[in-house]
Structure formats: C-alpha cells, structure tokens
Amino acid sequence: MRVGIGDREYMNGGGGGFNLRAATSMNPATMIMLINVAVFFLWQLAPYRFMQHHFMVSRLHMETGRVWTLVTAAFSQNSFVHLLFNMIMLFFLGRTLVDRWGARRFVSFYLVVAIFTSGVHVLITMVEGSNSMALGASGVIAGLFMCFAAYYPKATIHLMGIIPIQAWILVALGVGLDFYGFVEQMSGRSAEGRVQIGHGIHLAGSLAGALYVFVIEKRIRSRGRPRREKRPRGRVLRPDESSWQAPPRAPDPEDRLLDELLEKVSHGGLDSLSIHERETLERISEKRRSGKR
C-alpha cells in the first residue's frame, strides 16, 4: 500500500497533533489576525528595543537597512485598544473581500498596501525632518475599507455597534477627518502630537484602495475581455472596382473532348470519326444548343 504525504498524521491532525491541512486552508484574514495577535504578545515579552528595531518603521530604519520593517510594522500593535479596533475591522472586512477577491489577491493587497503606507510615512518624516516611528495595520485597514465602500456603498455599518450609517458616508467622514488631522500635524498645530495617530498613513491606505478599485481592477477586467474586430471604413466598391476575383472554374472534361473531336473533323472531315465519336459530338452539341453544361 502506498502512503502519500496527505496520509501523514501531521497533515490530517491524527492523534490530536498539528493539522497542517487545516492551517493552510485557513481564511487568510484569520491568519493575518493571528499574526497580529502573536506580534502583540511579542511586544509584551520581548525587549522593547528589539521590537522597536524590527516592528516599527521609520526613516532611520530605512537608512540603516531595516527595510523589512515596511512590512512588519503593518502586523504590529503594542496597544490592546489599537489591536482590538484593527482586528474587529479586519474580521468583518476580510470575510467579504476574501470571498470577492480570493485568498491570493487579498494577501497580496495587504502586503502591497503595507509597504506603500509605510513608505508614505517615511517620506512624510523626511519632509518633516523628523524620525518619528509608526506601527499598526491601520493604513491597510483604511485601504480595505475604501475597497469595501466602493463595492458596497450602501451597506449599513453600525458605528460603535449602535449608530447605523452607510459605508460610503463613513469612509467619506474618515477621509475628511484624516485629511484635517494630517494638515494639523504638518502645520505643527496638532495638540495630540505627530506620533499619536498616523493620519498620513490612513490617507495613503485610502488612496491605495481607491486606486486599486477604480484603476487597477478596471484594467485587469478590460484585459480579460475579447477585443472587438475593427470594421474597415470607406465607400462601398462597385463590382468592377473590387479587387476580389472569383476563383477559376474547374475545367469541364467535355470541353477537352469536344476540342479533340472538332480538331479531328477539321483535318479529315466527318468521315474520319467513328460511330461512337459522332454520337458523342452530337450529344455535346445538343447540350450546348440547349444551354446545359
């Protein structure tokens, strides 16, 4: 009996062990949530300096080669309230968008937007001339929420679990508040400080979501459509002007036989034909006179 890898105990969870098949088939939104939770507990256990160097993004980290923080910062929350809010949003948005996109596209979106929003934070700090650090999945959540609102603008969301509000209105309010907060931070008038809320990161996530739905996804759909053949334009040609020619007609064997008989008559007269040849000549001549071929 042949035993494949699918029959191993660690693949199917036999004996109460780790179920690799179940883990790999897990909803990607759930898997990302578990990674975020694991990093949160790592913040409680690992040295702060280690976590700061590897799970927060900043201009200094880019200058010192810690480019992986562009991704790891989007899986990192060191505040329980921050973690709870982001994971609740990821749970509800993730289920719908995974069903619509599939696992691969959802994970790709999360990673690409994580890099994009972290990169925007680095650019902002370069403009400011500061070295403020950032962490959290909020930028990616903003991008996911923008996509959700674009697909389902009239979906009802209960703000704080109580106030019903349509998705597009909530997104518009969020973008407006983030824009106001970003202007306040850049002007130095923000009382909350520049590190408390990453308004620029939120705006970058919303922009990424809008670009994906209204630009990138439209191009993906248009590439999948069959192209229409272009019809030639211009005046209709008359039959004598057309470059089209009818294919040559196949030669009639009777024509060749008729030519041979007539050639024989021209040299020796009708007496040179046999009885059978005379009958053939008369038959063909009668067909031609009646217009038959």
Image (cartoon, helix red, strand yellow):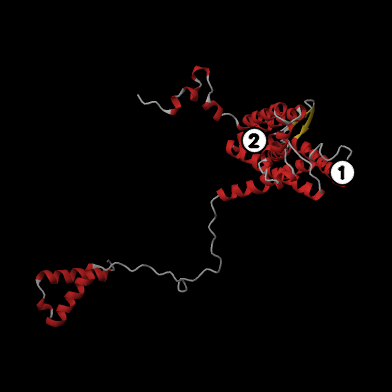
Name the residue at 45% across, 71% down. Answer: 243
Residue 202, numbered circle? none
> Is residue 148 among the parts visible in the rendering?
no
- Where residue 173 appears, as percent x and y from the top left, is 81, 38
- Describe the element under mark 2 as helix, strand or loop: helix
- Where residue 82 appears, as percent x and y from the top left, is 76, 30
**Mark 1 residue type:** Glu
* Side of 75 relative to 125 (left or right): left
For disc 1, the marked residue is 184
Labels in figure, total:
2
For disc 2, the marked residue is 97
Q: Nearer the viewer, residue 22 or 17?
A: 17
Q: Tell me the CA gap for discs 2 and 1.
A: 33 Å
Within-10-Å neighbours for mark 1: few <14, some 14–19, many 20+: some
Q: Nearer the viewer, residue 199 or 102?
A: 199
* Quadrant into which the C terminus falls: bottom left
Instruction: Between label 2 and label 1, give the one nearer the viewer.
Output: 1
* Side of 15 relative to 288 (left or right): right
Vertical order, 110 against 224 (above or below): above
Q: Nearer the viewer, residue 15 or 150?
A: 15
- Where residue 15 appears, as percent x and y from the top left, is 50, 17
* Side of 44 relative to 30 (left or right): right
- Give residue 116's quadrant in the image: top right
Q: Residue furthest top?
A: 15
Vertical order, 259 against 87 (above or below): below
* Quadrant into which the N terminus falls: top left
- Give residue 58's quadrant in the image: top right
Name the residue at 13% across, 72% down. Answer: 278
- Give residue 114's quadrant in the image: top right
Name the residue at 75% across, 48% down. Answer: 123
> Is residue 190 among the parts visible in the rendering?
yes
- Where residue 70 appears, as percent x and y from the top left, is 68, 42
